[in-house]
Amino acid sequence: MAKIYYDDDADLSYLKGKVVAILGYGSQGRAHALNLRDSGVDVIVGLYKGSKSWKVAEEDGMRVEEVERAVEEGDVIMFLIPDMVQPEVYKRLVRDKLEEGDMLMFAHGFNIHYNQIVPPEFVDVTMVAPKSPGHLVRRMFVEGKGVPALLAVHQNYTGKALEIALAYAKAIGCTRAGVIETTFKEETETDLFGEQVDLCGGVTELIKATFETMVEAGYQPEVAYFEALHELKLIVDLIYEGGLMKMWNAVSETAKYGGLTRGKRIINESVREEMKKILKEIQTGEFAREWILENKAGRPVYNKLLEMEKEHLIEKVGAKLRKMMPWLE
Ligand SMILES: NC(=O)c1ccc[n+]([C@@H]2O[C@H](COP(=O)([O-])OP(=O)(O)OC[C@H]3O[C@@H](n4cnc5c(N)ncnc54)[C@H](O)[C@@H]3O)[C@@H](O)[C@H]2O)c1
Ligand SMILES: CC(C)(O)[C@@H](O)C(=O)O
Ligand SMILES: [Mg+2]
Ligand SMILES: [Mg+2]
């Protein structure tokens, strides 16, 4: 069984006297920086001149410096800039500023696991990866709660890497919910697999395929939108709160029978085979190589697919229908 750490297992005093440099002030960066500060930790934000986030961080009352300066001051350096930018920033601005006993931290294991960043042996290397988008990391903290996270130690030079990483996890609120010990390999591979087949890739394709099937059969797009997309949140909320059975118990008997008998025809053996192939691409590093090359080429596929998603009928219909429900914003 997984080892899970809670508030009582973590001691904030391991961050006392240390400066935490948060590189990046986007989804995760802003949430981590604000939560750390509210927990009494000395935080400095590292950005590049011209970053749109600079003003946001300053308006939040953060001390903001360019990356190099923040790393010089920081004892704990958390990488919350995009994964594909991290290796170049590391080589150009971070590597030469590291001091013995510093800690490099990550919220996703990609660059360490796929050897895009190879830190020197004289630093600690750890990960605290909230299992949630950044805005929830902040919202839950403000509400006195926390989101669960994964924690991993890749290098323990100081002998205190676990304790310091746990203090960080506590300061951003994650030990309130529970922090599961893992490895960089396990976090990276499961995180990529989850977002590709289920959370981001699988769900959007399921929504579009459901919507398109109805529209092509002559049903009104507005009705199809509610069925394929809007109601998904209500169903997922039930699953999130109380597992699959809470959802099955809340829907009609007809929905239960129809869902239980038809679901397996949608996620059938061939879909499961494809999932296994996708997992292999992640495990062998094939996906990582593809994504790194895509970035080197200026992201032609990424940009094209995002553009197509933006232009999809469900997005047009959705924008109109969501105006009927201003409380959603
Ligand atoms: N978004 C999520 O919900 C989420 C969840 C778990 C883990 N993560 C991980 O957290 C990390 C950060 O992702 P994110 O989605 O919060 O990023 P983001 O895209 O929301 O924010 C990126 C930030 O980095 C800054 N930035 C970009 N290039 C920079 C550079 N060259 N130098 C300095 N700053 C630069 C941007 O100005 C911005 O403030 C990634 O490792 C990601 O895998 C993200
Ligand atoms: C929020 C997610 C999808 O779980 C995260 O892994 C990310 O990469 O943004
Ligand atoms: Mg991810
Ligand atoms: Mg994830």
Image (cartoon, rainbow, N blue to C red):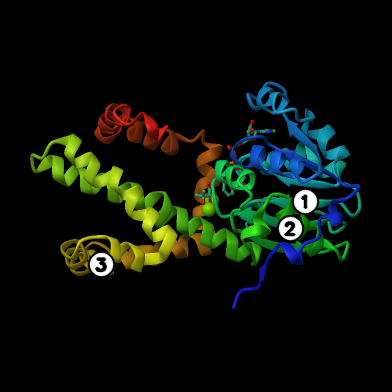
- How many neighbours does mark 1 have within 10 angstroms: few (below 14), some (14-19), or many (20 or more)? many
Can residue 284 be seen?
Answer: no
Amino acid type for the residue under numbered disc 1: Leu
- Inter-mark Cα distance, 2 to 3: 38 Å
Say which quarter of the image contains residue 252. Answer: bottom left
Element carrying mark 2: strand
Q: Is residue 169 visible?
A: yes
Q: Are the two marked residues, 2 and 1, in contact with CB atoms closer than 8 angstroms?
A: yes
Amino acid marked by disc 2: Thr
Query: What is the three-letter code of the residue carrying label 3?
Result: Asn
Is 178 left or right of 245, judged from the image as shown?
right
User: Is the residue under label 3 in contact with that under label 2 (CB below 8 Å)?
Assistant: no
Q: In this view, does 122 lie above or below 304?
A: below
- Mark 2 vs ligand 1: CB below 8 Å: no
Residue 103 placement (x, y as % from top left): 81, 52
Which numbered disc covers residue 104? 1
Quadrant containing the C terminus is top left
For label 3, the crowd category at 10 Å Cα-Cα, with few meaning under 14, some 14 to 19 and many 20 or more, is: few
Q: Which x, y percent locates residue 204?
A: 34, 46
Q: In the depicted view, which residue is nearer to us: 98 or 6?
A: 6
Q: Is mark 3 on a helix, strand or loop?
A: loop
Assign the N terminus to one quadrant of the image. Answer: bottom right
Which residue in the protein does label 3 denote? 268
Q: Where is mark 2, residue-wise? A: 126
Q: Earlier in the sequence, mark 2 or mark 3?
A: 2
Mark found first going from the N terminus, 3 or 1: 1
Helix, strand or loop at mark 1: strand
Pick the residue in front: 280 or 232. 232
